[in-house]
Amino acid sequence: MEPRFAPALRTLQKLLQETSSTLKTPISFALIGGLAVSAWGVVRATEDIDLLADSTPSRLRNTSLQGNVQRNLEKRGCVVEWRPGEPDDPIPLLLRVGLPKPLTPLRADILWAHKSWQREALARKITVKLSRLKIHVLHPEDLILMKLDAGGPQDLLDVERLLANSPPELNLPRLAQKASQLQLGGVLKKCLHGDGRTR
């Protein structure tokens, strides 16, 4: 992991924990982007921090939570923008957080969980050590499912590399079964053969 990300991750983790405490609203989160891929042993360049998050109550069902989260983060020097998607958007809600100085211009894109299997993935998150910092990361199987579901060229390349450099936590039969349940089995098979990007 690039050295510049360690203080940003530390600050972001603290911000989310403080927001959860201040609002008395449990917020669960885990890395899902390029940093998560790197955490599982695949070298991957990235410019941003990507997280999957959920709250109790869910932001998708409690609109007043949106303003409370935004005001709380802005008080701590962040630039905050909620980005709701269109009805058919695969990402219905994204929280973009520009980190405070001196970490600017680093930012975090936080996808709010909107499917039951994504919430289950957050419950299975694993704490790993990155540059002497303990951070929550999605289990490699759940990270692969997130990327199969997203389906972009970089996502599928990440899946191919994770499968080729399989971490010991990854159980391929279990992954295949879950992918099939989510109607992602065909894409997974292509990735296993190194041609997932021809989806």
Image (cartoon, rainbow, N blue to C red):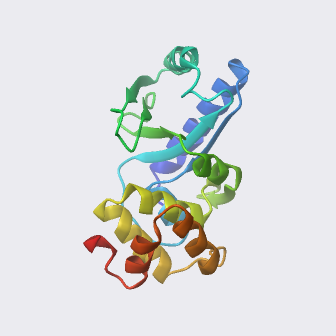
* 180 sits left or right of 109 in the view: right
Residue 94: percent from left, percent from top: 43, 34
At horizontal 38% and vertical 85% (from top left) the residue drawn is: 193
On screen, residue 12 above or below 82? below
Residue 162: percent from left, percent from top: 48, 74
* 140 sits left or right of 85 in the view: right
Residue 145: percent from left, percent from top: 51, 62
Residue 100 in sight in this render: yes
Which sits in the foreground, 120 or 161? 120
At horizontal 59% and vertical 79% (from top left) the residue drawn is: 172
At horizontal 34% and vertical 74% (from top left) the residue drawn is: 196
Which sits in the foreground, 131 or 123? 123
Residue 105: percent from left, percent from top: 35, 36
At horizontal 72% and vertical 24% (from top left) the residue drawn is: 21
State how many labels appear: 0
Rendered image quadrant of residue 82: top left
On screen, residue 23 above or below 86? above
On screen, residue 154 above or below 74? below
Residue 2 in sight in this render: no
On screen, residue 40 above or below 128? below
